[in-house]
Amino acid sequence: MSEEETKPVEEEKVVVDAAVEAEAEAPVKKQETAEDLLKSDLDGVKIRRAKGSKNITVGIVNVLATFNNTKVTFSDPRGNVISWSSAGKCNFRGSRKSTAYAAQVVTQDAGRVAMSHGMKEVVVKLNGPGMGRDSAVRALQSLGMVVTEIIDVTPVPHNGCRAPKRRRV
């Protein structure tokens, strides 16, 4: 009788050991903070191939940063537009359209579409005096694009037309 009693005890130990091992293997989930969610947004950028994918690896990014808005256009080397975005398209309204954060969001929005068409290397052409110039370039680099050149193409008059009279506020 003593042998029969010991067998079930050994089986119970095996079952208990298997349950302990399963608990040890299962990773302990901790709550994600806002910081973790923001990091994961940029780290794991999932790029899907676009439906009518153009397979363009090199392109030009035109960033127009005015005092009131920011527009970003991705094009191929010949100038054919692949993707574009603006602060208004990304639901920024009023004075928020001209902020550096709006420029970052706009660049990421247009950049993901361009990356889905295969774009990896870009030449950046900055135009205008707005706040979104630097943050647009940083957003491109955070997406994983290789910035080969940064060119400032802001038009500068060589004493052309007479300037309008000064504002009185």
Image (spheres, helix red, strand yellow):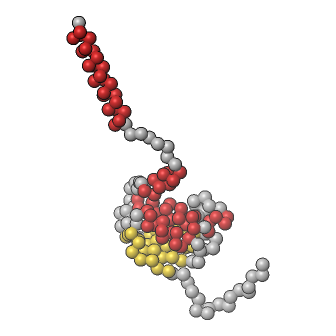
Between 139 and 27, the residue placed more toward the observer is: 27
- The structure residue drawn at horizontal position 75% and vertical position 82%, both measured from the top left corner, is 167
- The structure residue drawn at horizontal position 30% and vertical position 27%, both measured from the top left corner, is 17
Q: Residue furthest bottom?
A: 159
Q: Can residue 110 be seen by looking at this rendering?
A: no
Q: Residue furthest front?
A: 2
* Quadrant location, the N terminus: top left
Residue 133 lies left or right of residue 26; in this view the side is: right
User: Quadrant of residue 21 in the image?
Assistant: top left
Residue 52 in picture, x, y percent from top left: 40, 58
Residue 10 lies left or right of residue 119; in this view the side is: left
Residue 13 in picture, x, y percent from top left: 29, 22
Q: Is residue 14 above or below residue 131?
A: above
Between 160 and 100, the residue placed more toward the observer is: 100
Q: Residue furthest right?
A: 169
Q: How many numbered dots are placed on residues in this image? A: 0
* Quadrant location, the C terminus: bottom right
Q: Is residue 44 above or below residue 153?
A: above
Residue 94 in picture, x, y percent from top left: 67, 64
Residue 149 in picture, x, y percent from top left: 41, 77
Q: Residue furthest top?
A: 1
Q: Can residue 68 be seen by looking at this rendering?
A: yes
- The structure residue drawn at horizontal position 54% and vertical position 77%, both measured from the top left corner, is 127
- The structure residue drawn at horizontal position 40% and vertical position 59%, both measured from the top left corner, is 116
Q: Is residue 40 above or below residue 20?
A: below
